[in-house]
Image (tube, coloured by chain):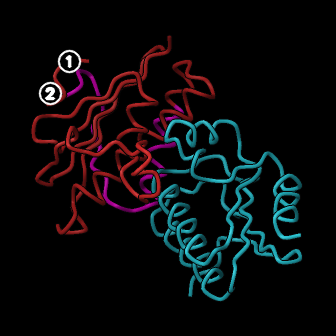
Chain colours: A cyan, B red
Amino acid sequence: MSESRLRISKIDEVTQVEFIDRNILDEANIQAISDEISGLIDTTSTPQILINFANVDHLSSAALGALITINNKTNEKDGTLRLANIDPQIYEVFVITRLNKLFNIHETLNDAMTQFNATTN
Amino acid sequence: MGDPSTSIPGSESVQLVNDRDQINELIDRILKLAVDAGLKDAALFAVRLAIEEAITNAFVHGHEGLDTNLPVTVEFKVSDGDLQIAIEDQGPGFTPEALPDPTLTENLSKPFGRGVMLMKAYMTEVAFNSQGNRVKMRYLVS
């Protein structure tokens, strides 16, 4: 198995996922990332996933596709996916594709965690 | 920009195989030329994204079902505030006009079909040849 491209930690019921790479462009890496997060969703009854984009400078449409697949899988299990810390240039990609309407996007990790806590309490 | 099926006058042409290190090396080289030609941060982000999408399309969709060792041809020319690039695969081509609009509400949760729209959104000009196996793009600093 290849080395993980993610840092994963658990805070309360929320699984935080952070990308190690600055560029999420490589097809093989994107597939590996998608498979790893999908595995986390599969092993959780109601997945609460927070993806931290703090390190990310570039992503491709294939990476957007992987995020959509992760979002769809999370929704199928009545879970919630939130995205945070997205660089303004990358956020613009979400706006152009209208994916800012599909995803729960937060400026900071704290904002996202507050929303998780508000919906679970 | 002219006919998308014709070569970019004065351009450099490279045969590129589907190898991440070679792709990164070529894109880094083009971006360095772009920096020297006066393209700034937002322009570099745009150009990088569009080239990545075009190269991915060429290998993943253009060469689907073909020999994985087949190269694509990348032509590029960078001059003052003007970057032109063409990417041509050896596949049968596709009809870009037939692509569904990924921004429609019913398509938002489909995990594919955004590459060409991003290329068009970020570059000044994007045109495909009639066969649909060659895309020519231009970024002009306004």
x, y percent for residue B35: 57, 26
A59 sits left or right of B52 in the view: right
**Label 2 is placed on what type of residue?**
Thr
Mark 1 chain:
B
Q: Which residues are magenta?
A: B7-32
State whether residue A54 is above or below residue A3.
Answer: above
Q: Foreground mark, 1 or 2?
A: 1
Mark 2 chain:
B
Residue B23 in magenta stretch? yes
Q: Residue at x 54, y 73 (%)?
A: A73
Q: Residue at x 58, y 45 (%)?
A: A101
Report how far apart the C-alphas of labels 1 and 2 lie in the structure. 8 Å
A1 sits left or right of A9 in the view: left
Determine contact: label 1, label 2, CB under 8 Å: yes
* Residue position marked by numbered label 1 in the rendering: B2
Q: Which mark is residue B96?
A: none
Identify the element where label 1 is drawn.
loop
x, y percent for residue B98: 20, 43
**Label 1 is placed on what type of residue?**
Gly
Residue sitting nearer the eye, A26 or A68: A68
Residue sitting nearer the eye, A54 or A64: A64
Query: Quarter-wise, where is residue B140 in the image?
Result: top left
Q: Residue at x 52, y 43 (%)?
A: B28
x, y percent for residue A22: 66, 54
Query: Quarter-wise, where is residue B138 in the image?
Result: top left
* Residue position marked by numbered label 2 in the rendering: B6
Identify the element where label 2 is drawn.
loop
Neighbour tally class for label 2: few under 14, some 14-19, many 20 plus, Cα within 10 Å = few
State whether residue B40 is above or below residue A32.
Answer: above
A37 sits left or right of B8 in the view: right
Residue sitting nearer the eye, A30 or B31: A30
Q: Going by the picture, which residue comes out furthest to the top?
A: B142
